[in-house]
Amino acid sequence: MDVIGNGFLAGHLSTIAQGHPGVVVAAAGVSAAQHTSAESFRRETALLNDLIRRCSRSGERLVFFSTASSGLYTQPGQPGTEDGPVRPTTPYGQHKYALEQELAVSEIDYLTLRLGHVVGPDQPPHQLLPALTAQVRSGRVRIFPGSRRDLIDVTDVVTIIDALLGTGASRTTVNVASGCAVPIERIVRHIERRLGLTAQWVDGTPAVTQEISTAKLRRLVPRAERMGFGPDYYRRVLDKYLSPVGAAGSDHRPLPVTPL
């Protein structure tokens, strides 16, 4: 496996790189849902086009990371599916969906993975958990009422990708998430309890969130049924990576807490 990039996901995927020859992973794209930089979008588009040309010549399979965030799935009432309609509402969601479509009209072997909110060590500070943790530590958190977030441990993401590549799934899109979106208030409250801190909550713009369907994931990767996904899964993920104040001897490195 040739992992393109040196960031959060790229680092974790390096652990399975030897097991998948003939696979190219585009792990150097835009990773911030709040991102609106046209230049960053252009760079990722250029990278993907270069990799499509490469894979067209070499016959390699290309793995592309899209999003299963509320920027893409915006129709509440039923879980968002890979084959169902999507109406991206943010520049980030529109950008990722446009790249999905470029892959779909290409002739290469590809796998598009729509990721939930991945959590783990060495995350950049703009991503969900480091950002929320920094806000809690600062004493002030902005809450968008109605928003829900589907958290998934990066180790589970790597396990799923490893399994998906082993199935030979081709020219398809798969949601990679826990399937249990959690109200943002519960996530922030659990972070506060875990850190032993209380922050002031400031309301932002009310949000609309669509659940994420994992039916296709569970069909392709039966092991996902045994990975502990469920209503309490998010608590285990937070507890794994957020050390309580004064804790010592933790088995895992805490998330970085670089201030926003």
Image (cartoon, rainbow, N blue to C red):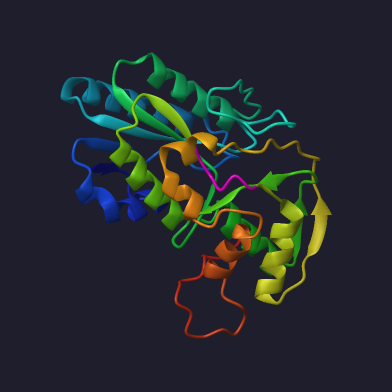
Q: What's the residue at 53%, 52% (across, down)?
A: 152
* Up/down of 215 relative to 185, above or below: above
Q: Quadrant of residue 206?
A: top right
Q: On the picture, is 197 further left or further right than 169?
A: right
User: Which residue is nearer to you in this view: 129 or 105?
Assistant: 105
Magenta stretch in the rendered image: 175-180
Instruction: Estimate the x, y position of residue 74 in percent, counting from the top left.
Output: 68, 30
Q: What's the residue at 51%, 85% (across, down)?
A: 248
What predominant SS class does the magenta segment belong to?
loop
User: Which residue is nearer to you in this view: 14 or 31?
Assistant: 14
For the C terminus, the image quarter is bottom right
* Up/down of 179 relative to 8, above or below: above
Q: What's the residue at 23%, 25% (across, down)?
A: 55
User: Which residue is nearer to you in this view: 129 or 237?
Assistant: 237
User: Which residue is nearer to you in this view: 175 or 44?
Assistant: 175
Residue 179 visible here: yes
Total labels drawn: 0
* Up/down of 231 relative to 219, above or below: below
Q: What's the residue at 59%, 36% (across, down)?
A: 213
* Residue 178 shown in magenta: yes
Residue 258 visible here: no
Instruction: Estimate the x, y position of residue 131 in percent, counting from the top left.
Output: 61, 56
